[in-house]
Image: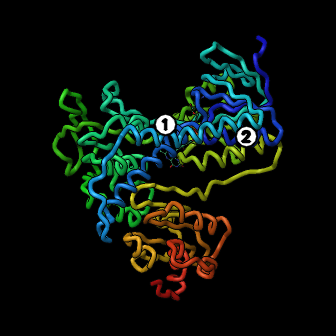
């Protein structure tokens, strides 16, 4: 069969991984086609992930800040929330970015084909779109088809009151009561938004702490604040049975200290995401897909088929946009003939909750489990003039370093803007910095960034007063 479109590079999926790969490939001179099933580019991150959630979290922060302002003598009264206007604001933010991507694709002469793609051979993808089917023949391909929310099987998904993160971001209404199943990053970010908007929020988490993967000490200030704000958290508890009735969604729980069955106006299920590896006809191309739907790749993002690469959520955890973009760039460069590889050791994780929690590199728990000999420099924000001025002293910054070489190998920050501050620690690890290098670097005063310098100085034993 004759191909409808021929190209050097086909990128399947236009999320952060896919659009970055396509743009880089085009910049390196490869004739590139980008296949995306949805009308707008940007994938989960721009359309129903990172960006809309952060727009809503900003609104939540404004509400909290206004209420908090009483502490310094300013009163705004009760916030009046216009849900339609808030939704419009969120959509405007998303639209600005996705339109920008469409412009950037055009500028680079990346041909965007809308439709759902499936491999039909090692060099062909068939795309089913509104206008019919097109066969695209490629020399090389980058799979960037991402992931989707895990839908727990015993939940009544045809009932609109049961939501995944995409539904929750739609912001159909503000329920009186909301159950969030899953106390990870996505669940807690949405809990933060809905609580600020006025919902009574309950969180159940199967594990022994919120935000699995982060060190326990980093999570505590967030857990304390949620409690103070009236959010109920149940750890080691499973939402086991769910029944929809006219009055609400009736949920039963299992686990030690599990609450009695309770009825909620809405339930958000945020228990993780599963990769789309099994849904793209990979077998027709000979591309191996693991049991859980992840596609195995080497350090150059190559699958077992040398001219087919895979990147982003579909290749493994952590499922983060900045990991996907980095891998996208790498795959495009390797495909264009550059000799590059990458070992993913330093990928920052950030929960944009209030306070934010950010960590990178080795955690204290990992160091302990691996028997690594580490030192920790910890600086409490109660000693930061800037944090005191902001009325947010619950945070702290810690640096984790090799006890022998003193090289920084990890770090964690909890507090407002922790996500913006963690990049310095990531750079320190990548550059092989010793703790003293950070301590001797002049950080501007009075900023929260000083806390990174101070965490290094705590270790050096030369802590100075920050007031
Ligand atoms: P995706 O973004 O999933 O994109 C894949 C694209 O491929 C999609 O557009 C999909 O439509 C398309 N596609 C799939 N199959 C086909 C097919 N057969 N044919 C054509 N097209 C196809 N990460 C962060 O780093 N920071 C955050 O703050 C953050 N917040 C998040 C908040 C939420 C609520 C969620 C759900 C996720 C969040 N993430 C965040 C995770 C982030 O969105 C993902 O890690 C990122 O989008 C992964 O990028 P990707 O390119 O691998 O795939």
Q: Residue at x 45, y 36 (%)?
A: 149
Q: Is residue 315 visible?
A: no
Q: Residue at x 77, y 37 (%)?
A: 108
Position above or below: 187 against 247: below
Q: Earlier in the sequence, mark 1 or mark 2?
A: 2
Q: Is residue 196 visible?
A: yes
* Residue 175, image x, y percentages: 27, 39
* Residue 178, image x, y percentages: 27, 42
**Looking at the image, what colour scheme do you see?**
rainbow
Number of the label disc, if any, that sits on residue 36: none
The residue carrying pointer 2 sits among few (fewer than 14), some (14 to 19) or many (20 or more) residues within 10 Å by Cα, namely many
Name the residue nearer the viewer: 247 or 295: 247
User: Of all residues shown, which one is farthest toward the left?
Assistant: 260
Number of the label disc, if any, that sits on residue 274: 1
Q: Residue at x 21, y 32 (%)?
A: 248
Tell me the quarter of the image containing the C terminus: bottom left
Ligand 1 lies in quarter: top right
The answer to which image quadrant residue 11 occupies is top right
* Residue 216, image x, y percentages: 39, 63
Name the residue nearer the viewer: 371 or 239: 239
* Residue 305, image x, y percentages: 72, 33
Q: Residue at x 52, y 82 (%)?
A: 459
Circle nearer the viewer, 1 or 2: 2
Between the C-alphas of marks 1 and 2, the distance is 26 Å
Horizontal arrangement in the rendering, residue 231 relative to residue 41 (left or right):
left
User: Of all residues shown, which one is farthest toward the top?
Assistant: 1
Element assignment for label 2: helix
Element assignment for label 1: strand
Horizontal arrangement in the rendering, residue 57 relative to residue 279 (left or right):
left
Q: Which residue is mark 2?
A: 23
Tell me the quarter of the image containing the N terminus: top right
């Amino acid at each position: 069969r004759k191909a409808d479109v021929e190209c050097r590079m086909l990128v399947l999926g236009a999320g952060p991984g896919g659009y970055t790969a396509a743009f880089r490939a085009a910049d390196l001179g490869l004739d590139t086609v980008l296949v995306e099933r949805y009308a707008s580019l940007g994938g989960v991150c721009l359309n129903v992930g990172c960006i809309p959630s952060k727009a809503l979290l900003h609104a939540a922060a404004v509400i909290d800040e206004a209420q908090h302002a009483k502490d310094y003598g300013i009163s705004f009264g009760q916030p009046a929330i216009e849900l339609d206007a808030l939704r419009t604001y969120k959509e405007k933010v998303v639209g600005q970015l996705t339109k920008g991507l469409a412009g950037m694709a055009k500028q680079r002469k990346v041909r965007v084909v809308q439709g759902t793609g499936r491999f039909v051979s090692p060099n062909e993808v068939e795309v089913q779109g509104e206008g019919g089917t097109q066969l695209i023949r490629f020399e090389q391909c980058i799979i960037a088809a991402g992931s989707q929310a895990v839908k727990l099987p015993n939940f009544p998904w045809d009932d609109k009151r049961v939501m995944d993160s995409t539904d929750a971001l739609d912001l159909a209404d503000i329920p009186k009561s909301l159950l969030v199943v899953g106390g990870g990053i996505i669940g807690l970010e949405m809990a933060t938004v809905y609580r600020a908007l006025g919902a009574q929020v309950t969180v159940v988490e199967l594990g022994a702490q919120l935000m699995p993967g982060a060190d326990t000490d980093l999570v505590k200030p967030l857990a304390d604040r949620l409690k103070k704000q009236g959010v109920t958290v149940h750890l080691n508890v499973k939402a086991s049975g769910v029944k929809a009735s006219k009055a609400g969604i009736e949920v039963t729980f299992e686990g030690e200290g599990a609450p009695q069955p309770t009825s909620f106006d809405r339930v958000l299920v945020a228990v993780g995401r599963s990769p789309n590896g099994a849904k793209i006809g990979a077998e027709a191309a000979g591309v191996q897909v693991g049991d859980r739907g992840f596609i195995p790749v080497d350090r150059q993002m190559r699958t077992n088929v040398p001219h087919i690469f895979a990147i982003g959520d579909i290749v493994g955890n952590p499922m983060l946009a900045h990991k996907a973009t980095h891998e996208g760039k790498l795959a495009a460069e390797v495909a264009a003939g550059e000799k590059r590889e990458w070992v993913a050791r330093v990928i920052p994780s950030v929960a944009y909750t209030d306070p934010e929690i950010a960590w990178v590199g080795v955690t204290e728990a990992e160091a302990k489990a691996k028997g690594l000999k580490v030192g920790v420099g910890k600086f409490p924000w109660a000693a930061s003039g800037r944090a005191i001025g902001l009325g947010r002293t619950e945070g702290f910054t810690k640096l984790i370093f090799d006890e022998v070489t003193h090289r920084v190998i990890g770090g964690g920050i909890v507090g407002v803007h922790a996500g913006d501050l963690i990049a310095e620690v990531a750079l320190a690890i990548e550059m092989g910095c010793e703790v003293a290098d950070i301590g001797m670097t002049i950080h501007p005063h009075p900023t929260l960034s000083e806390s990174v310098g101070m965490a290094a100085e705590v270790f050096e034993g030369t802590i100075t007063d920050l007031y």
